[in-house]
Image: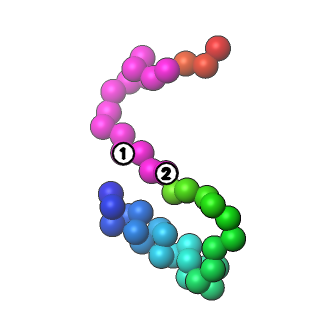
Protein backbone atom coordinates (compact mmCIF):
# COMPACT_ATOMS: atom_id res chain seq x y z
CA UNK A 1 0.00 0.00 0.00
CA UNK A 2 2.79 2.44 0.88
CA UNK A 3 4.50 1.75 -2.42
CA UNK A 4 1.30 2.55 -4.34
CA UNK A 5 0.90 5.88 -2.56
CA UNK A 6 4.56 6.73 -3.08
CA UNK A 7 4.29 6.01 -6.82
CA UNK A 8 1.09 8.04 -7.07
CA UNK A 9 2.67 10.96 -5.23
CA UNK A 10 5.78 10.88 -7.44
CA UNK A 11 3.69 10.66 -10.61
CA UNK A 12 1.57 13.63 -9.58
CA UNK A 13 4.69 15.70 -8.91
CA UNK A 14 6.16 14.71 -12.30
CA UNK A 15 2.92 15.70 -14.05
CA UNK A 16 3.03 19.10 -12.31
CA UNK A 17 6.67 19.73 -13.17
CA UNK A 18 7.80 19.13 -9.59
CA UNK A 19 5.50 21.82 -8.22
CA UNK A 20 2.48 21.57 -5.97
CA UNK A 21 -0.13 24.29 -5.78
CA UNK A 22 -2.39 23.35 -2.87
CA UNK A 23 -2.59 21.48 0.40
CA UNK A 24 -4.34 18.42 -1.01
CA UNK A 25 -3.93 15.17 0.86
CA UNK A 26 -3.73 11.71 -0.67
CA UNK A 27 -6.05 9.34 1.15
CA UNK A 28 -6.17 5.67 0.28
CA UNK A 29 -8.29 2.98 1.92
CA UNK A 30 -7.52 -0.70 1.83
CA UNK A 31 -10.76 -2.71 1.90
CA UNK A 32 -10.60 -6.10 3.64
CA UNK A 33 -14.05 -7.30 2.65
CA UNK A 34 -17.42 -7.43 4.30
CA UNK A 35 -20.77 -6.56 2.92
CA UNK A 36 -22.62 -3.27 2.81
CA UNK A 37 -24.35 -4.02 6.13
CA UNK A 38 -21.06 -3.05 7.83
CA UNK A 39 -21.03 0.42 6.29
CA UNK A 40 -22.37 3.56 7.90
CA UNK A 41 -25.38 5.05 6.15
CA UNK A 42 -26.22 8.67 5.52
CA UNK A 43 -29.80 9.69 6.18
Answer above or below: position of 13 versus 25: below
Q: Is residue 18 above or below residue 9?
A: below
Dot 2 corresponds to which residue?
A: 27
- Numbered range of the magenta stretch: 27-40
Percent x, y for residue 23? Answer: 63, 61
Disc 1 target residue: 30
In the foreground, 22 or 15: 22
Reply yes or no: does residue 24 show up in magenta.
no
Q: Is residue 11 above or below residue 27?
A: below
Tell me which secondary structure the magenta stretch mostly adopts: loop
Mark 2 closeness class: few <14, some 14–19, many ≥20 residues within 10 Å: few
CA distance separating discs 1 and 2: 10 Å
Q: Residue at x 32, y 57 (%)?
A: 1
**Residue 10 drawn at (x, y percent):** 48, 76
Q: Is residue 24 left or right of residue 3?
A: right
Q: Nearer the viewer, residue 25 or 42?
A: 25
Q: Which quarter of the figure has residue 4?
A: bottom left
Camera-side residue: 25 or 11? Answer: 25
Magenta run includes residue 31: yes
Residue appearing at x 45%, y 23% in the figure: 39
Amino acid sequence: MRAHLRRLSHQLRRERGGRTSDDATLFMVQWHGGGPEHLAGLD
